Amino acid sequence: MSKTIKVNTFAPAANAHGENGPEYVGNLRRGELRGIIKINKDNCVGCDTCRKVCPVGAISGGLGVVHSIREDACVACGQCLVACPFNAVEQMSFIDQVMQKLDDPKTLVVAHPAPAVRVAIAEEFGAKPGTLATEQIVNAMEKAGFVTYDINQTADQTIIEEGIEFIKKIQYWVLGKRGPEFEKASHHPFPHFTSCCPAWVKNVETYHADLIPHLSTAKSPMQMGGSIAKTWAAEFVWKKDPRDIFVVGVMPCTAKIFEAARPEFNNAWKHLVETGRIPADTPSFQDIDAVITSRDIAEIFRRKGINPLDMPKTRERSTMEIYTGAGTIFGASGGVMEAALRTAYFVLSGEELKDPDVKVVRGYQDAVVEATIPVPIKELGGKVFEVRVCVVNGALQGLETVLRRIKEDKNRYHFIEVMNCPGGCVNGGGQPVRTDGAAWLNPTLPIPVQL
Ligand code: SF4
Ligand code: SF4
Ligand code: SF4
């Protein structure tokens, strides 16, 4: 059995912009976090491994020379961190803030765990690699003082949003429908790109700005959850003042730390002020207050003396822990696409997809997966429209190929899923770092039945 390496962390520094500073410093807006991933110069031996795995060329340094990360160029994916054999790459961490909130009796601390987290933590406590321990981990979170709001539930909502957006695009661009309900689709041509991976979104914003109109406008599951937690759930489920709710994304991902701090993600605060539920002079707060990684939650368990493997293997799910299988597969490459295609197929054809597993787009062995999904269009008397899809399984491995193909033929695909990390979030930069160098979803390891 492999062991995992403890990753060094550092507390977030004061914002480089200052409270009333300029709106932009470099390419970072006021409120956005910079330097989420750093190289510790004392530990770096210049082996050059990190530079080779960086999807955006943000790392400088030659063999034998201490390396460094250019903050403006970095998309915070953490792939350099999990690849560094010398534990020289460190991560910004909100563990201390979360621990303080857990000790505050006035605050309801909500853990919002992503699907890929639950296959990784168990090994930190001695279980076999890939062990799925959802109930035990949620029970452990509860023991630590959290209430749980499962991200699988908001992944379902992202799929509905993204699926409907894709359907509108087909109706506008392919079937020629017009009218006010297609106004948004008219500004967002094919190919349609997924938007739930913040490292990919930052990659587009920094390096491929011409693709911005092609990105889905659906928020990621974590961001959907943050705003629902402080509005609907605060009022109807937890019956708590939203100002006393602290929502913590528990993610396999370091780029999510960046996403949560984006200034536009204060939708709950805007809604609550607009509807008079909180006073108009309430200082703005983010939908997600803090993001901790799989490594961080394991550290919180350790500091509180909790071993998730000692927790009961069953639990009665609360309202905020109910979800479908579509939300569950978000954590694996191809999962977002597969889930959205099921919705699109149903709406456009009027029938359920006979084999709901669109497995052709799932997987991690190939950097780029292409497929054609025939969809009989109900309003065209069953005439088949072929939806051409593509999944990029790791930005470094497959993105360049796909962008070149689009340049050569902009009609080649209708729908493209891009996940920055190879294999998707299960191999994210926030997952435990294994001493055997293996990734979490690796052909040599048993694949978890459910992610
Ligand atoms: S992989 Fe680690 S040790 Fe090697 S150059 Fe990068 S930071 Fe330095
Ligand atoms: S975090 Fe990702 S983008 Fe940033 S330097 Fe590391 S590998 Fe490159
Ligand atoms: S693939 Fe997943 S883990 Fe990796 S950067 Fe994107 S959202 Fe984060």
Image: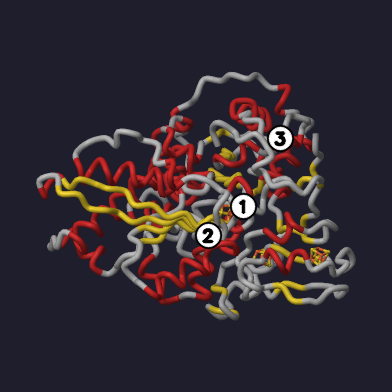
Q: How many marks?
A: 3
The residue identified by callout 3 is: 129
> Is the CB of the residue bearing disc 1 within 8 angstroms of ligand 3?
yes
In the rendered image of this protein, does residue 315 appear above or below residue 356?
Answer: above
Cα–Cα span, label 3 and label 1? 18 Å
Q: Which callout, 2 or 3, points at the residue further toward the start of the chain? A: 3
Instruction: Give the colour scheme of this rendering.
Output: secondary structure
Q: Is residue 59 left or right of residue 374?
A: right
| Label 1–label 2 contact, CB within 8 A | yes
The residue identified by callout 2 is: 198
Q: Is residue 263 visible?
A: yes
| Label 3–label 1 contact, CB within 8 A | no
Q: Amino acid at mark 1?
A: Cys
Cα–Cα span, label 2 and label 3? 26 Å
Cα–Cα span, label 1 and label 2? 9 Å
Query: Where in the figure is residue 436, as x and y percent of width and height?
Result: 80, 45
Query: Where in the figure is residue 437, as x and y percent of width and height?
Result: 77, 49
Rendered residue at 59%/46% (across/down): 248
Rendered residue at 27%/44% (across/down): 345
Under tag 1, what secondary structure?
loop
> Is the CB of the residue bearing disc 2 within 8 angstroms of ligand 3?
yes
Q: Tag on residue 362?
A: none
Label 2 neighbourhood size at 10 Å, few (<14), some (14-19), many (20+)? many
Looking at the image, which is closer to me, 170 or 19? 170
Please tell me in which quarter of the rendered image ligand 2 is found: bottom right
The residue identified by callout 1 is: 253
Under tag 2, what secondary structure?
helix
Q: Which callout, 3 or 1, points at the residue further toward the start of the chain? A: 3
